[in-house]
Image: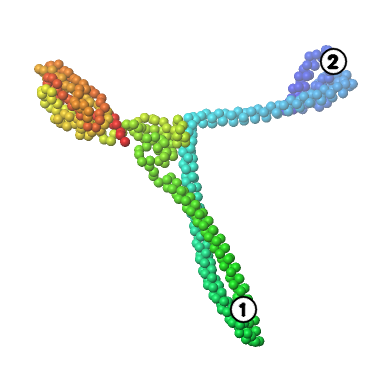
Amino acid sequence: MKQTIILIFVSLTAYGFTSSAQQATTWTNPYFYYHYNTPLESPGQKISANELVGNQKQLSGYDNDDHSIENTLSSHVVLLTTCLRELITTKSDLFQTRTEVENVRKELNALKENSQLNSTSTQLLANVMATVENLKNEMITKKDLAQTTQHLEETFSSVESVKNELANVMTKVENLNKDTNATKADLVKTHTEVESVKKELNEMKENSQFNSTSAQLFTNVMTTVENMKNEMITKTDLQQTTQRLDETHTLRVESVKNELTDVMTTVKNLKKDTDAAKFPSSIGRMPTSCDDLQQIGHTKSGLFSVMGNQTVDNVYCDFTKPTTEAGFQKRIGYVDVKTSPVYFYAQKTSNSVKINAVIPFDLLRLNVGNALNTSGIFVTPIPGKYFFSYSGISSRSALGRVELQVKTATANWSRIGQAFGSANLQTFSLQANLELAKGDQIRLLLVEGAILDDAKHYTNFVGQLLEEDIIQ
């Protein structure tokens, strides 16, 4: 590779000098120097005698310029070496750049595949975070209950220890009381003996019958008396010590009793709080707000049903907020609750021609709640909002006029609406939505004309409960 680069460079230089051979120059031609000193190894290449003579002549003119030729060759070698290094460096950089491009291409493909999972991953992450939050709140509640239980067990252990210690103290006090009573009895006995000895000594002194034996006896008696005196002093000290011990134990027993009373009070309060957290509780009425639900014992936020004015309301309770904050309770709507359904569908199979009479219905196709009877009177079973619809047809020779009437606890029958159909088989109808109380009555009254009906059932009367008024 190096020889090829040198050959190309030297050839180019020789070509330049050949084109300007007629001109005199001081520049040293490296081609001739290389060719003359280190000819290239090129098989089959021969130099003619004339060319050799010409070269020798031309080189003879450069004898004095050897130093310049060496400098020129050094410059060419440095240049070629630098070019070779840069070529190797460029080749390495090109390979590294190609590797990096392949890596970037792989990463782009991976990112393209992963981008399709972003929407699903986002939703999954939201669900996971919500689940983690719920689990966190539940773990905090369980941890508080476990700590309360642990405190309660430690308190019970302390109470048992205090009970055992109190029993031991009471046993010691009883033993000391027994020793004190025995000491008192001995002290009384000793005091009696001393008094007896004193009397005998006095008698002996009065009779003056002392002799050597009496003197010895007297000495022995005095020694005995002294010993008894010392024993009495010791017993007296023992009695005082016992008394102080009784006082100390009495104070200690009272202190222990007071501490035990405090511990038992604390235990009862803890037990009461624990029972309140574990067992069902009530506020004595149906809850009407999130505040009532929290007093009952609800701690987890969510949707709940509470009593409204005349409906069962659906509310969202956020128990993480204070009761006075606006977001603590939010009303969603009302729940369509009915204690029992009420709806009917009645028809006729014959004409009605009796004026100012209630229209009867001899065919009840549906009568859930048994609020309508065949006489045509509807009696409201539960308070609420009702819907009624009536339709009929007049006879061939007479018109038809029908009124819908209501009777309440405070008012007699009154007209709600009227339907009219002219003669010669004309249809007529009426509809109404009414707020009725329990016991209110509804009827259809034929005011004028006649109503045609037969097995084809031209007359239809429908009613149903739309919304019940829930009363606590």
Name, please, the residue furthest toward the top: 22
For the C terminus, the image quarter is: top left
Does dot 2 land on a helix, a strand or a loop?
Answer: loop
Horizontal side of residue 20 vs 262, given as left or right = right
Q: Which of these two is toward me, 156 or 253?
A: 253
In this view, the mark in front (2 or 1)? 1
Residue 224 - label: 1
Q: Position of residue 102 (x, y in %)?
A: 59, 29
Report the residue at 80% width, 16% height from top.
17
Q: Position of residue 311 (x, y in %)?
A: 33, 32
Horizontal side of residue 18 vs 470, given as left or right = right
Residue type, mark 1 in image: Thr
Question: What is the spatial separation of the Cα atoms under label 2 and label 1, in whole angstroms?
Answer: 158 Å
Residue type, mark 2 in image: Thr
Report the residue at 47% width, 53% height from top.
264
| Residue that mark 2 sits on | 25
Report the residue at 10% width, 23% height from top.
353
The number of callouts visible is 2
Q: Residues within 10 Å of mark 1 (few under 14, many from 20)?
A: some
Q: Looking at the picture, does residue 159 appear above or below residue 62? A: below
Horizontal side of residue 154 vs 402, given as left or right = right
Name, please, the residue furthest toward the front: 206
Q: Position of residue 228 (x, y in %)?
A: 60, 75
Q: Where, by quadrant of the figure, is residue 454 drawn?
A: top left
Q: Looking at the picture, does residue 234 appear above or below residue 408? A: below
- Would residue 422 be seen by someone viewing this image from the given angle? yes
For the N terminus, the image quarter is: top right
Q: Looking at the picture, does residue 200 appear above or below residue 338? A: below
Q: Residues within 10 Å of mark 2 (few under 14, many from 20)?
A: few
Q: Which of these two is toward me, 389 or 171?
A: 171
Q: Position of residue 166 (x, y in %)?
A: 51, 60
